[in-house]
Amino acid sequence: MSAVTPSWLLALHSTSEVLGLGLAPLAPFFQASAQAAQSPRINSHPLGRRLSNDLLACVEQLLPAHQWCELGRLAVATGPGGFTGTRVTVVFARTLAQQLALPLDGFSSFLLIAHRLRQRAEVGDQPFWLLQELPRRGIVAGCYAVDEWALGGIAEREAPRLYGQLDDLPPGARLEARVDPAADVEQLLRLSGLAAVAGSAAPWANVLPLYPTSPVAQP
């Protein structure tokens, strides 16, 4: 019996109330074509607090467990986002990558938004800030800029972190960091595919959830 050739890239995004999943063939990313990622399958599931119970079933709906041996790479959004939702999906992705000996790419949800905004020409060439307000805690913000040397053409100049108030942010354009699960999963697939082409080893142990605020801090 011939060995199964890994052929799929699976992406998971759960930093909002909606679980986003994406599946794309890996081979087209290695072809010299402007349409590298052909016909990805993307599903959105508004699970909310049911994520812990329903995550596995949703993944199996996209790719049954008996076909996981056909996976060649994984990608996951690392946050910032809800503590439980982000943690559950990152842990699942790490476990799957460890057990199947697969590369795992982790990208911040803000970076995915930045790539989406740039692709839709909603931001220009100047650096910009993405903001998410946390009631009674402050503002989570990260800075992004066009960079031809960065993966996908956008660099994360400042990783998302907590600021006390708007006045604490350095100058620059400011936009709301609003998650679009399906569109951001598409960006997750694209960036992971580019990382695969670049030969990134992407060890699973390096991928951790991003928590700008402490999950045990008092409000």
Image (tube, grey):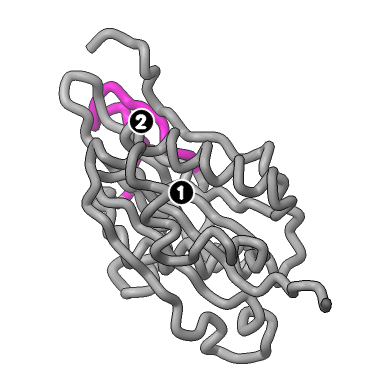
- The label on residue 77 is 1
Q: Where's residue 29, x and y in %?
A: 62, 79
The residue positioned 24% from the left and 47% from the top of the image is 47
- The label on residue 9 is none
Q: Which residue is mark 2?
A: 84
Check the picture and name the quadrant holding the C terminus: top left
Q: Where's residue 197, x and y in %?
A: 70, 72
Crowd rating for badge 1 (residues with CA inside 10 Å; few <14, some 14–19, many 20+): many
Calculate the distance from the C-alpha at mark 2 to the C-alpha at mark 1: 13 Å
| Residue 37 visible, this orientation | yes
- Identify whether 174 is placed above or below 139: below
Say whether residue 145 is magenta: no
Query: Closer to us: mark 2 or mark 1?
Result: 2
User: Left or right of 137: which side holds 52?
Assistant: right
Q: Residue furthest bottom?
A: 33
User: Left or right of 76: which side holds 133?
Assistant: left
Amino acid under disc 1: Ala
Q: Where's residue 110, x and y in %?
A: 39, 49
Q: Residue furthest left?
A: 135
Q: Where's residue 214, x and y in %?
A: 39, 18
User: Left or right of 7: which side holds 64?
Assistant: left
Amino acid under disc 2: Thr
Q: Residue furthest top?
A: 218
Among the two numbered marks 2 and 1 on one chain, the one whose residue lies closer to the N terminus: 1
Say whether residue 163 is magenta: yes
Crowd rating for badge 2 (residues with CA inside 10 Å; few <14, some 14–19, many 20+): some
Residue range in magenta is: 158-172
Q: Secondary structure at mark 2?
A: helix
- Identify whether 41 is placed above or below 115: below
168 or 161: nearer the viewer:
161
